[in-house]
Amino acid sequence: MTERTSGDPTNRFGDGLGAADASAAEPSAARPASEPSAAPPAPRAETAPPATRTGIAFGALIAGAIVLILLLVFVLENTESVNISFFGASGHLPLGVALLLPAIGGALLMGIVGTARIVQLRRHVRRERRTWWLSQDSGKS
């Protein structure tokens, strides 16, 4: 362990006991009561751990599990049978399921469109990088 800059190795843990022990052992080292005591060392600011992809995925997994539980409760509470007609096809479904199916369809459609957009952006970035590298290589010659 390293000593603090005060030169008092007995108070290296910042518990305040070292200064009292030192002044009791050496009466000449005691401070007058009118002199303000030195402020205790400021605690180190704890930094949050960096966000990682695994941590973000874990958070998303927990959020997804909570949403799944809420949807399950919704379906179980709305069990009244309703008549559903869609493009000539008809049938009876519980109300919760009848409302949940279009929501799932919308989420899947959103995922497909989002995936297509991500692929499009990655292609664009790859093309731009390739163009930039080619311009850098031609400038060196």
Image (cartoon, rainbow, N blue to C red):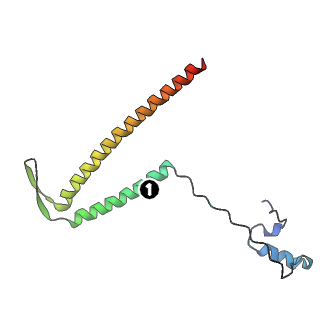
The quarter of the displayed image where residue 33 is located = bottom right
Q: Is residue 58 above or below residue 19?
A: above
**Residue type indicated by callout 1:** Gly
Q: Relative to residue 1, is residue 106 drawn left or right?
A: left
Q: Secondary structure at mark 1?
A: helix
Q: Relative to residue 40, is residue 68 drawn left or right?
A: left
Residue 11 screen position, x and y as percent: 79, 69
The C terminus is located in which quarter? Answer: top right
Q: Is residue 39 above or below residue 127?
A: below
Residue lying furthest top in this view? 141
Nearest the viewer among 121 and 40 is 121
Which residue appears at 32% of the width and 62% of the height? 69
Q: Relative to residue 63, is residue 83 drawn left or right?
A: left
**Could you classify mark 1 by the number of other residues whose Cα lies within 10 Å: few (under 14), some (14-19), or many (20 or more)?**
few
Residue 124 screen position, x and y as percent: 42, 32
The quarter of the displayed image where residue 138 is located = top right
Nearest the viewer among 93 and 127 is 127
Q: Relative to residue 52, is residue 8 drawn left or right?
A: right
Residue lying furthest right in this view? 28
The N terminus is located in which quarter? Answer: bottom right
Which residue appears at 39% of the width and 58% of the height? 63
Residue 126 screen position, x and y as percent: 45, 31
What is the total number of numbered labels drawn onto the structure image? Answer: 1
Residue for badge 1: 59
Residue lying furthest bottom in this view? 33
Residue lying furthest left in this view? 88
